[in-house]
C-alpha cells in the first residue's frame, strides 16, 4: 500500500472513521485512498474553518477525535481559529496537512509556507512525516498525542503520500486512560472544604457529565461548599435530572462580585478563572486576593474518580443531590425577543438534543430557560473565536445522527463560517439553526462600553463598525442559496410554529429570528 | 493622545488612509480613535479573510499599503491565507493585530495565543509593541518595513492602545526607493542576450506596467530574445496598446515544453519558474537542465531603470514595440460556456477597467479573449490560496473608485470568502462579479488526473469530494442575501445582456454564469 493508504488504514484501525476535508492537489493521493481503504467517512466542507469546527463538535460528542485533511499552510490557516477553540476546550483533533513533496519545498512554489510554524501555536504536537515508510507510525503517534483532549498536527508531504510504504499500516494503539488523582490531594481538598472557610468547588475541562454534576451537588451538600461550573464548559449535561450547579458569569465585573467572599476555590478540571479580556481598572483575576485556588484535578485527570473519592472522604455517600425538575415554560406571544425564543426552545426541545450555543449576547436569555427542559447536552464556545457554532453543529450531528442538534447562533458570528450550511444540506444533517438576528455585533457594543473607550460612547465611525445592517443580512436567502430550508420569524407565534415544526421533522432547517439586542 | 490615536495618526501621516477591519474587544480603543483622528476610512468586513484579501487588492491598485485591524491570534489566523497571497505577490500590507493587555497575557485567557508565532510564517517583519510611548515609533517602523512590497505585522496590546503616549504621533517616513541594478549586471545580461544562444527575458514581481511591457517588447526585438511574463503577474497592464508578450503556461508539463529549448533565462522581477505542485515523474524546475537562469533584477529593484538600461545597451532606442491593436470580439449566441463569457467580457470591458482573475480553470478561456480588449489592468492570484478574488475586488474598487472592477471568480473559490459580497454592497463598490458556476472543483478534477492517483480515475468517494453540486449553490440567492443585485445566465444572450447592463451602470452586481467545465 502507498503512504496515504497506510495512513488512512492506521486512522481507521484506531477508530478514527470521519475525515472532515477540503483537499487540494497535494492531497489527491489521500483522496484517492478513500476508495481503496474501507471505513472512512469523508465530509466535504467548502471552507476550512467549517471543517475544523466540525471536527471539534464531532469529537466533543463522539468522545474521540475526527481527522481533518487540510491543504498546505493556507488551508491550515483557514482552519486555525476553530482549532484554537478546540485546543482551549481540551478537544482531541488529528489534523493531516498536505504539503509539497519533500524535494519540492526548496523551490518556494507559490503555495510553499512554513506549515509547522503555522501549526505550532494551535497544536500540542506537530510533526512532518519524511518518508512513506514512516507515515503510519507517525499517524499512530499523532493519535496517541491527541489522546482524549489535545491537538496533533501531522504534515503529509505529497511524495510521502504517493510512495510505497513497505511497513503497511499500524494497529490500534492503547487508548489513553485518565490519570488518577492521588489520595494526598483529595485529603488536601477535604481539609479546605471542612475548614469552615467559604469554599467553592468549580468543575470544568473536557466535559461535565450528568453523573459528575450529581456527584458535585452531593459534595456541595456534604460540606456546605458552593458548587459551580466554569463560564463556558466544553460539554455539559443540562436540563431535567441534572444537578443544580452555579455557573460563573461571563462578565468579569459580575464574576468578581459573584465569588468575592471565597476563601478557597477547589478546581476540578477547570482552570482558575480569569477575565476574558483586560479592561482598564478591572482585575485580570476573578477570585479575590484572599482566595486560595487549589487545582485538585487537571482536565486530563480522572474526574469521575476524583469526585467519587472526594464525596467518600466527606462522608457524603448517603446524601441526595439537588436536581432540576422537568418544568417546561409556557409559549410566549407578541413581538419576538431572545427570551421568547428561549421559552420556545425550552418548551419543544426533545430529549437528548444537543444545543450548540454561540448566541453570544442573546445567549444570556437562553441558558436560564433551558435549565429545566428535557435532558440535553450543551456545547459552548471555549476559545472565544466566533464562527464556531455552525461548524460545531455539523460535527455534532455527524457524531450523533439520532439526536436533534439545535444551533443557537448570533448573526455576526454566523457570517464567519456561513458555508457550514451547505455541508448540513449535503449530508442531510438533523440540525435546526436559530439565527439571533439583531443586525449588529451586539457583544461589541457592550464591550465598547466596558472598555471605557471614548467614555463608553462610540462616535459615528466606531458605531458603524459595530452594526451589520446596511445592507441587512437575509439569512433565509443565504440558507436557501446553500440548499437549507429556511424561514423568518418576527413574532413569537411565528417562531413557536416554525420551531415546533423543526423539532417534529428531520433534516437541516434555519430560522432567521429577528430580535432586538439585549443591550443598548 | 492615547496609544491608539498616536498609531492612527502615524498611519495617516504616512498616507495609509484605509483600514480594513473586523475588530473585537481588545481593539475597541483603536475603533474609538477613528472618531478622534481625522483621515482614516474604515471598511468593515464580516470575516478576516475578506479584509486581508481586500488589503492586497487595494495595495496593488493604490501602489501603497492599506492597514488591517485584526482581533488577536484567531482573527489573524482567519486572515492568514490572503496575507500569504500578498506576501507571495510582493504586496505591501501593514497588519495591526490587537492583543490582550501586556499584563493580561500571563493568565492564558480563552483568546490568548502565540500571535507572533502565527504571524511569522506570513510576515517579513513581526513586532509586539510594549508601551504606549513606543507604539507610534513601532508603527513608523512597520510602515518602513512594509515598504513597497512586504508584509509587516504589528501587535497592539490593549493597554498600549488605551495608555497615554507622551511622544505623540510620528511624521511621514521617507518612502522606499527601488534599488538600481548595477551596470555590470546589465552588461552580463547583454552578453547573454547577444551570445547567439536561445534566450528569453521574463518579467514579473510587483507589477508589469504598460511602459515596462513596451520596453520589454523592444528589448526582445533588439536582440531576438523571446519576451514573456511569469505565470501569475501580481498586476499587469493588458489589452489594446500594451506589448505582445508571451505568458508562461500554468501546467508544468506545458511550461516545460514551452521553454525546453532555452539556453538563457533572464529574470527581471520574476523568479526562476517552478512547478506549482510536485507530480510523480515531472521535474520541479520548469527550465531545462542546459538553461542558465540569470536574475538580472529582483522584485524590489528598479525595474524601469533595468529595462531602460538594457534597451540602451542593446542599441534598441530606435526600435518600435510590438503592440496589441484594439480588436473586440463579436458576441456569441447559444448555450453559455467560459469562452462565450470571455467574448462578452472583452467586448464590453470599459477603458481602464480592473480585472480580478480567480476563475481558475475557466480563466484559461478568458485571458486570450481580453488580449485586444480596451486597455485594462489584471490582478492575478499570486500565492495559490483560493478565496482571494472577491476580497481583492473589494480592495481594488476602494483604491480606484472611478474604475470598473470585474471579478472573474470560480464557484469553488468564491465560497471561501463569499462574505466579501456584503462589503461590496455596504460600500456600494463598482464591482461586477462573474461566477463561473460549473458545480465542481474543476481544477481538482484536472489535478487528480495529473497526480496519477488511482490511475488518474477518482473512485466514487474521491469524485464526491471534487464536486460541489448536491445541493447546487445558488449564487443569486447568496448575493441577494447580502444586498448585492444578482441574476443568472444560462445562455450567451442572457449573459451578454446582463454584462452589458452591468458595464453601463454603477454599483455591485453578480452574474451567476452556468457554464460547463472546460475539462472532463
Image (cartoon, coloured by chain):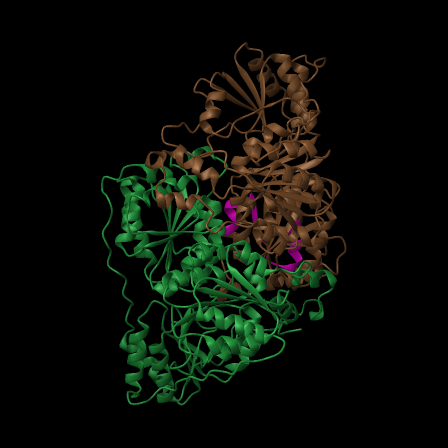
Chain colours: A brown, B green
Residue A23 x/y as whole percent: 61, 59
Quick check: is A138 in the magenta stretch? yes
Q: Is residue B338 left or right of residue A280?
A: right
The magenta span reads: A118-139
Q: Is residue A91 left or right of residue A458?
A: right
Residue A432 seen anywhere in this rendered image of the structure? yes
Residue B192 x/y as whole percent: 37, 84
Residue B248 seen anywhere in this rendered image of the structure? no
Residue A245 x/y as whole percent: 61, 22
Q: Is residue B30 left or right of residue A207?
A: left
Q: Is residue A464 above or below residue A361?
A: below
How many numbered discs, if any?
0
Residue A468 x/y as whole percent: 47, 47
Quick check: is B516 in the magenta stretch? no
Q: Is residue A240 above or below residue A401?
A: above
In the picture, which quadrant includes the N terminus of chain A? bottom right
Residue furthest to the right: A38
Q: Is residue B89 above or below residue A304?
A: below
Q: Nearer the viewer, residue A135 or A54?
A: A54
Amino acid at each position: 500500500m502507498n503512504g496515504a493508504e497506510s495512513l488512512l488504514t492506521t486512522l481507521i484501525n484506531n477508530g478514527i472513521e470521519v475525515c472532515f476535508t477540503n483537499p487540494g492537489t497535494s492531497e489527491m493521493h489521500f483522496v484517492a485512498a478513500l476508495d481503496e481503504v474501507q471505513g472512512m467517512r469523508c465530509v466535504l466542507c467548502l471552507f476550512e474553518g467549517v471543517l475544523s469546527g466540525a471536527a471539534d463538535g464531532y469529537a466533543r460528542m463522539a468522545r474521540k477525535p475526527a481527522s481533518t485533511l487540510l491543504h498546505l499552510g493556507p488551508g491550515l490557516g483557514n482552519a486555525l481559529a476553530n482549532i484554537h477553540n478546540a485546543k482551549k476546550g481540551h478537544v482531541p483533533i488529528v489534523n493531516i496537512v498536505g504539503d509539497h513533496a519533500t524535494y519540492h519545498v526548496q523551490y518556494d512554489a507559490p503555495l510553499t509556507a512554513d506549515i509547522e510554524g503555522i501549526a505550532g501555536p494551535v497544536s500540542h504536537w506537530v510533526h512532518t512525516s519524511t518518508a512513506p515508510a514512516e507515515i503510519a507510525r507517525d499517524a499512530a503517534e499523532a493519535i496517541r498525542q491527541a489522546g482524549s483532549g489535545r491537538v496533533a498536527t501531522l504534515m503529509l508531504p505529497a511524495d510521502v503520500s504517493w510512495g510505497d510504504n513497505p511497513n503497511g499500516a499500524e494497529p490500534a494503539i492503547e487508548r489513553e486512560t485518565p490519570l488518577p488523582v492521588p489520595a494526598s490531594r483529595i485529603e488536601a481538598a477535604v481539609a479546605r472544604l471542612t475548614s469552615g472557610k467559604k469554599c467553592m468547588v468549580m468543575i470544568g475541562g473536557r466535559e461535565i457529565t450528568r453523573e459528575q454534576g450529581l456527584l458535585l451537588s452531593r459534595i456541595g451538600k456534604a460540606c456546605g461548599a458552593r458548587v459551580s461550573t466554569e463560564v463556558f464548559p466544553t460539554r455539559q449535561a443540562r436540563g431535567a435530572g441534572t444537578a443544580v450547579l452555579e455557573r460563573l458569569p461571563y462578565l468579569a465585573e459580575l464574576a468578581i462580585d459573584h465569588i468575592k467572599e471565597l476563601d478557597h476555590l477547589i478546581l476540578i478540571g477547570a482552570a482558575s478563572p480569569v477575565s476574558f479580556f483586560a479592561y482598564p481598572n478591572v482585575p485580570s483575576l476573578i477570585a479575590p486576593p484572599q482566595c486560595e485556588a487549589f487545582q485538585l484535578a487537571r482536565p486530563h485527570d480522572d474526574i469521575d474518580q476524583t469526585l467519587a473519592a472526594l464525596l467518600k472522604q466527606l462522608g457524603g455517600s448517603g446524601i441526595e443531590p439537588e436536581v432540576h425538575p422537568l418544568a417546561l415554560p409556557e409559549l410566549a406571544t407578541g413581538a419576538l425577543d431572545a427570551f421568547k425564543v428561549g421559552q420556545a426552545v425550552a418548551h419543544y426541545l426533545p430529549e437528548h438534543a444537543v444545543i450548540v450555543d454561540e448566541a453570544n449576547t442573546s445567549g444570556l436569555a437562553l441558558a436560564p430557560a433551558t435549565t429545566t427542559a428535557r435532558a440535553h447536552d450543551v456545547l459552548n464556545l471555549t476559545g472565544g473565536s466566533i464562527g464556531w457554532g455552525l461548524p460545531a453543529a455539523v460535527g455534532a450531528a455527524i457524531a450523533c445522527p439520532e439526536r436533534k442538534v439545535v444551533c443557537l447562533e448570533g448573526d455576526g458570528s454566523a457570517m464567519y463560517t456561513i458555508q457550514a450550511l451547505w455541508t448540513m444540506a449535503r449530508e442531510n444533517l438533523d440540525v435546526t439553526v436559530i439565527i439571533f438576528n439583531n443586525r449588529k455585533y451586539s457583544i461589541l457594543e457592550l464591550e465598547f462600553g466596558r472598555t471605557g473607550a471614548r467614555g463608553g460612547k462610540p462616535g459615528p465611525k466606531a458605531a458603524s463598525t459595530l452594526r451589520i445592517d446596511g445592507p441587512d443580512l437575509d439569512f433565509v436567502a443565504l440558507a436557501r442559496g446553500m440548499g437549507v430550508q429556511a424561514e423568518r420569524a418576527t413574532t413569537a407565534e411565528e417562531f413557536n410554529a416554525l420551531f415546533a415544526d423543526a423539532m417534529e421533522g428531520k433534516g437541516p432547517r434555519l430560522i432567521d429570528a429577528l430580535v432586538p439586542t439585549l443591550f443598548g
